[in-house]
């Protein structure tokens, strides 16, 4: 299926959004086992599971929209 606006798909955008989604998913699942030193250095939203899951979903939706050529 060709993109809606018939321009080539920038795969680097899609790949970067999928990478960021995977990174947020990692933080949402593994943040509880980080050391005390890492907890001091990382921002506080990394330890909020709901925010990380929301960011994961948002990045995946953005990657899908970019893949389909919606923006």
Image (cartoon, grey):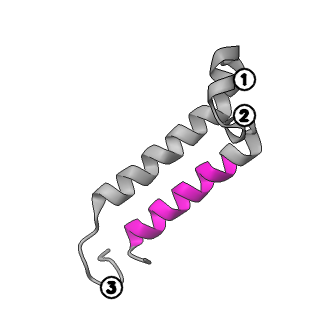
- Gap between marks 3 and 2 measured at Cα: 39 Å
Q: Nearer the viewer, residue 4 or 13?
A: 13
Residue 67: % across, % down: 38, 66
Quadrant hosting residue 45: top right
Magenta segment's dominant SS is helix
Q: Which residue is mark 3?
A: 5
- Gap between marks 1 and 2 measured at Cα: 7 Å
Residue 35 in sight here = no
Q: Which residue is mark 2?
A: 47
Q: Is there a contact, CB below 8 Å, between mark 1 and mark 3?
A: no
Left or right of residue 27, residue 14 in this image: left
Quadrant hosting residue 34: top right
Looking at the rendered structure, which numbered label has been put on residue 40?
Answer: none
Quadrant for the N terminus, please: bottom left
Residue 19: within the magenta?
A: no
Up-down: is 41 above or below 70?
Answer: above
- Name the residue at 27% across, 82% down: 6
Quadrant hosting residue 11: bottom left
Q: Which residue is mark 1?
A: 32
Secondary element at tag 3: loop
Quadrant for the C terminus, please: bottom left
Q: Is there a contact, CB below 8 Å, between mark 1 and mark 2?
A: yes
Magenta region, residue range? 53-68
- Name the residue at 45% across, 49% down: 18
Viewer-nearest of discs 1 and 3:
1
Secondary element at tag 1: helix
Q: Nearer the viewer, residue 3 or 46?
A: 46
């Amino acid at each position: 299926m060709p993109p809606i606006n018939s321009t080539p798909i920038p795969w680097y955008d899609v790949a970067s959004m999928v990478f960021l989604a995977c990174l947020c998913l990692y933080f949402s699942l593994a943040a509880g086992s980080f050391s005390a030193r890492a907890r001091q250095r990382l921002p506080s939203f990394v330890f909020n599971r709901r925010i990380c899951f929301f960011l994961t979903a948002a990045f995946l939706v953005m990657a899908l929209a970019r893949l389909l050529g919606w923006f």
